[in-house]
Amino acid sequence: MLPTVDELLQFFHEYEEIEKHGFKLPHWQQPGACYFLTFRLADSIPRQLLDKWEDDREAWLKQHPPPWTPELEQEYHERFSRQIEHWLDQAHGECVFREPEIAEILAQVLLFHDGAEGRYQIHSFVIMPNHVHGLFSLHPDYRLEDCLKNWKGISARHINQLLGREGNTLWQRNYFDRLIRNAHHFTAVARYIRRNPAKANLSPGSYHLYESDLVKNLLDA
């Protein structure tokens, strides 16, 4: 019998220590955990939309400081993360990842250290025209912010070189992450990533989807 997702992966432990950090958004980490991550291009959401969103979010955070119960975490994502996802799916901005050659550069960067000692294991990702959703596990000694810095820095250098844009700010500084709580949550996120292009009415060739064998077997069973 093949091992289950629960046996293969490490999920969020409610009673173990959580490291909290962040620039503007709250980020929670646990060593070796599995994450759902969204990061986006710098021009992917109009500034006037973000200003109102940030004001509302700051007011909510003052009333509900972390740590959160699972119910409050769900409320946060219902109120704020889903709004961001809705705006991203509207394909604001230049949407450089519509070009397969540019999306392929990012895909190669994401997969370069997949499974490498001390780095990460990628389960699935989708490169949308102006943002990326990813599902992956980090090595206990590798930090989330270091992982993102590596992905963004290398991909920006190669993409800006291809586009002839020296010093261009490709990526938005912040990102959205969520610790995966259990196998059910893992499956739901993997399914969301697979379905996201159809949800955004994208045609084949205007996005790049990657799934590990684990995710393919899980979703196709």
Image (cartoon, rainbow, N blue to C red):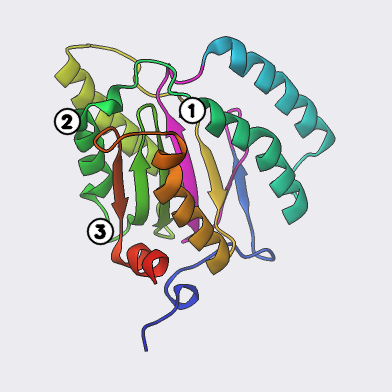
Tag shown at residue 101 = 2
Q: The magenta stretch spans which residues?
A: 22-45
Residue 216 sits in quarter: bottom left
Q: Is residue 175 left or right of residue 3?
A: right
Does residue 187 appear in this view?
A: yes
Give above or below for 62 relative to 8. Answer: above
Q: Is residue 145 left or right of residue 203?
A: right
Tag 1: amino acid: Leu
Give above or below for 129 relative to 197. Answer: above
User: Could you say whether the residue bearing mark 3 is in a helix, strand or loop?
Assistant: loop
For image coordinates 74% across by 43% down, the residue present is 75
For image coordinates 50% across by 34% down, the residue present is 175
Mark before the other along the chain sequence, 2 or 1: 1
Between residue 172 and residue 90, name the one nearer to us. Answer: 90
Residue 20 sits in quarter: top right
* Residue 84 image point, x, y percent: 57, 30
User: Could you say whether the residue bearing mark 1 is in a helix, strand or loop?
Assistant: helix
Tag 3: amino acid: Ala
Nearest to viewer (mark 2 / mark 3): 2
For image coordinates 60% across by 28% down, the residue present is 24
User: Could you say whether the residue bearing mark 2 is in a helix, strand or loop?
Assistant: helix
Nearest to viewer (mark 3 / mark 1): 1
* Residue 147 image point, x, y percent: 37, 43
Tag shown at residue 116 = 3
